[in-house]
Image (cartoon, rainbow, N blue to C red):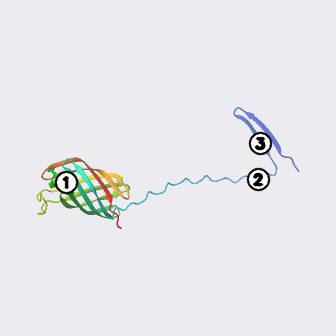
Amino acid sequence: MRRPAIGLVAGIGGIVLSVLSCQSSPMAPVAPPAPSTPPAPKSISLTGTWSGNLSDAQGAALLTWTVTQSGQDITGTAVTKPANPSDGTCASCHKNKEGTFQGTFTGSTLTLTMAFPGGTPEEPTPHCAVTITGTTSNVADDSITGTYSGSDTCEGPFADGRIALTRDRQP
């Protein structure tokens, strides 16, 4: 039987001890671990009823959405009611509307347009139409917050609007 040879090598970086044996077998290469893939983000469906508020230079209003989502496309109805109908702000008249919205929800970004047409006799300002547009990435399963701008055919453009909605839960 042959004895293993032991060698000692000294170098700049330190000392290396090496053991050689005539009965050694080559080591199989070890595959590197597969890179870990982060879990896919949870897919959020916006379908349902959402309620909350919006506020801009015209004043504050309550907002309710009834949303249907098909793929990335969202559609639905939007209803605004003034937060305080007798406060004398533009919102007490111009944010008392029923309309529609449409948009897209891609990844975590929601882009939408709400259209409130004029011509509805029961509204305080039936001849005024309002359009609101916005984009936000602040979308969660139970809340949406963001900013918007818009235009009112009677009052003109408005900017710096803020929206905050929560999903209505069914019992």
Residue lying furthest right: 1
Q: Nearer the viewer, residue 138 or 13?
A: 138
Q: Which mark is residue 18?
A: 3
Q: Please name the amino acid that badge 3 sits on.
A: Ser
Local crowd size for mark 3, using a 10 Å CA cut-off: few (<14), some (14–19), many (≥20) = few
Mark 2 = which residue?
Answer: 25
Q: Which mark is residue 84?
A: 1
The answer for how far apart the CA atoms under marks 3 and 1 are is 86 Å
On screen, residue 78 above or below 14: below
Q: How many marks?
A: 3
Camera-nearest label, 3 or 1? 1
The quarter in which the C terminus is drawn is bottom left
Q: Estimate the x, y position of residue 16 in percent, counting from the top left.
A: 74, 38
First in residue order: circle 3 vs circle 1: 3
Residue lying furthest bottom: 171
On screen, residue 112 above or below 9: below
Camera-nearest label, 2 or 1? 1
Q: Estimate the x, y position of residue 9 in percent, counting from the top left.
A: 76, 36
